[in-house]
Image (tube, helix red, strand yellow):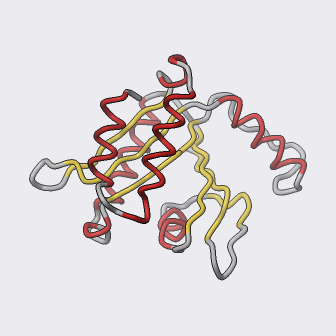
């Protein structure tokens, strides 16, 4: 991931108040990360019919985080004791499509790009942590056949750890 890609992400999010915190967070993560980590994080963009970028996914390798997640899954009893996380999984970190274009199939196209990109890189597993006030993201991932490792959702928040085996 590059600084230019972060600028592009900020342009896509624009003045969407619900996600303005996201742009600040991804900028901070980029600044705090070293060049090696940033080289293992990828941005995949989605264009509309006019070729304008209207959505994105941030995906990549985060070995330290995946190690912690794997240990947590076992310690909390969310997975069987013989659970083995693939040694080199991707984390689906962020996915966003402009609100006015949701429901038009762009999210599906973007997710298909993620699967193709991941397979092309030889990666066999994707993990994600989803947390949002709206259940839309979690419901979308469920439709995309996510394995629900643990669902913490309540009436105020849709929150879960997910995975996909490719």
Q: Nearer the viewer, residue 127 or 52?
A: 52
Q: Quadrant of residue 34?
A: top right
Q: Nearer the viewer, residue 151 or 115?
A: 151
Residue 101 versus residue 22 in the image, above or below: below
Q: Give how far across and how far down residue 133 sits, in percent.
A: 55, 72
Q: Residue at x 47, y 21 (%)?
A: 39
Q: Residue at x 35, y 59 (%)?
A: 108
Residue 27 versus residue 121 in the image, above or below: below
Indicate the quadrant containing the N terminus: top left, top right, bottom left or bottom right: top left
Q: Give how far across and how far down residue 70 sits, in percent.
A: 78, 41
With 162 as the anchor, is 57 left or right in this view?
Answer: left
Q: Residue at x 56, y 66 (%)?
A: 132
Indicate the quadrant containing the C terminus: top left, top right, bottom left or bottom right: top right
Q: Give how far across and how far down residue 102 sits, in percent.
A: 31, 68
Q: Give how far across and how far down residue 88 sits, in percent.
A: 63, 29
Q: Residue at x 49, y 66 (%)?
A: 137
């Amino acid at each position: 991931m590059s600084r230019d890609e972060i600028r592009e992400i900020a342009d896509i999010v624009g003045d969407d108040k619900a996600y303005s915190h996201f742009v600040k967070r991804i900028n901070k993560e980029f600044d705090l990360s070293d060049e090696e980590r940033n080289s293992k994080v990828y941005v995949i963009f989605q264009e509309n019919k006019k070729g304008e970028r209207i959505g994105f996914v941030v995906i990549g390798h985060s070995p330290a985080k995946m190690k912690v997640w794997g240990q947590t899954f076992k310690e909390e009893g969310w997975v069987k004791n013989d659970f083995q996380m693939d040694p080199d999984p991707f984390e689906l970190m962020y996915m966003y499509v402009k609100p006015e274009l949701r429901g038009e199939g762009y999210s599906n196209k973007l997710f298909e790009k993620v699967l193709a990109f991941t397979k092309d890189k030889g990666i066999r597993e994707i993990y994600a942590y989803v947390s949002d006030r709206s259940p839309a993201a979690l419901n979308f991932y469920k439709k995309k056949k996510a394995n629900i490792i643990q669902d913490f959702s309540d009436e105020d928040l849709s929150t879960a750890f997910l995975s996909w085996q490719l």
